Each structure stands twice: as C-alpha cells, then as structure tokens.
Amino acid sequence: MSDNRKEEQTLPIVEMFYSIQGEGYHTGKPAYFIRLGGCNVLCGWCDVKESWNPDIHPQKTIPEIVDLVLSQPAKSVVITGGEPLMNNLDKLCEALQSHSIKIFLETNGTYELSGRWDWICLSPKLHHEPRQDFYAYADELKIIIDSPERLQWAETCKDKVGENCILYLQPEWKSSEKILPVIINYCKLNPEWNISIQTHKYLNIP
C-alpha cells in the first residue's frame, strides 16, 4: 500500500500566530497569520527578510496548518510572506474555507493567482512590477511610500485597478517620521486615497 503522506503538499512556514491585523482595510480585525517562506522581490526596507529563503523554514502539510488555525478562535486568516503565491494555494484555501474561515491574501502580484480568496491586498513594487492581469484581482491596493517620488508610481498603479478597489498609501516604517506628513497632505489633496498605518508596531503586538 502506498503512503499517501508522501504525496501531500507541504508549504514552507516562517511563522504562524493569532493576532490583530495592523494595517490596510482590515485593521483591527482578529486574524490568524500564516507567513510563507520565499520572496522574489527582496525590498531593501523589508522587515521580514528572514522570509526570503524558503529552504530554511520547516515544511507543514495542509492538514497540519489547518489544525493549528482551528486551535484558535480565528474566523479570518491572513496569508502573507515573503510572496505566498510562489506556492500553489488552491488546496490550502479549499481546506480553510471548508471550515467557514475567511481568507485574506497579501501579495506583490508577480505570480499567477492560485486559491480562492475573500479579499486580496495587492502591494506592488516598482523595482519588480506585478503581472498586468493581477491588478484586476485587487480588492485593496496598498503602496508603500518611502519617498515623495513614489507617489507618482502609486498613481500609475491606481489607474490599473478596478473602480471598487480601495486605495491605500502606507509610510515605510523607517521613513515614517519624514514621509508621513507628505502622505497626509497628499491624501487631503487626493481624497480617493486613504492612509494605512502599521498600528501593530505602535501597539507592540505581532
């Protein structure tokens, strides 16, 4: 008899934890976070550089992941990275949604979409642009701003998303003291944009 466990899909897990979403549209919502290893964009200001190399992180099967999610009272799961779509996420989404869990994706949009999602946050990067077809999937567009020049890039991205996509400008954390006044003024002049703040860092929660 064959060992079916050998055929099970596994995913590289950087960390898994139950917390509060700190940024973007779902700020303040309790959620279980699944951070997958592997990234192809490698932003210099990334605050989870340990996620870049998928080979250094333990692999877990989808049943193992789902059991950990179900061990907490979470009704929502955020799948993030790294870049989570470096993995096929069809089976993970199906397994989580079979338990009536809402699933939110955070992605740079450079890989083909897999999985079925309740919410997609697209955070594109200028030095490695998304697939052009990915803009249409975005429920939320979140542009990280580390200089005033990045606002022009944000406008370019805005023109590619759907009319119902919610628009956010988020200060890069290390530059926030300098760039936040610029973002505030820009949003006041361009009220289609909203400000996203990494509130979890101010609240000192994961």
Image (tube, rainbow, N blue to C red):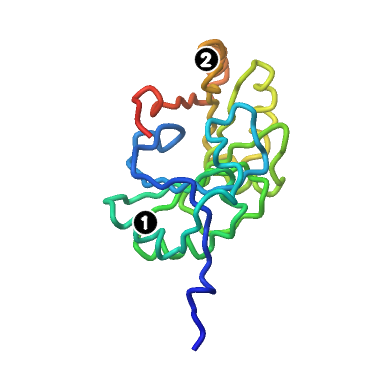
| Camera-side residue of 144 and 87 | 87
Q: How packed is label 2: few (under 14 Cα within 10 Å), some, or many (20 or more)?
A: many
Q: Residue at the bottom extreme?
A: 1
Q: Which residue appears farthest toward the left when viewing the image?
A: 73
Amino acid of disc 2: Leu
Q: Which mark is residue 101?
A: 1
Which element is circle 2 on? Answer: helix
- The percent position of residue 11, horizontal first and vertical second, equals 52, 58
Q: Nearer the viewer, residue 155 or 88?
A: 88
Tally of numbered tags: 2
For this orientation, the residue located farthest to the front is: 56
Residue for point 60% across, 23% down: 145
Mark sitting earlier along the chain (2/1): 1
Mark 1: secondary structure = loop
Identity of the residue drawn at 53% across and 54% down: 12
Q: Residue under circle 2?
A: 180
Above or below for 129 versus 171: below
Identify whether 2 is placed above or below 160: below
Tell me the amino acid under the disc marked 1: Ile
Alpha carbon distance from label 2 to label 1 = 34 Å
What x and y, as percent, mark residue 132?
A: 72, 45
Viewer-nearest residue: 107 or 151:
107
Quarter of the picture containing the C terminus is: top left
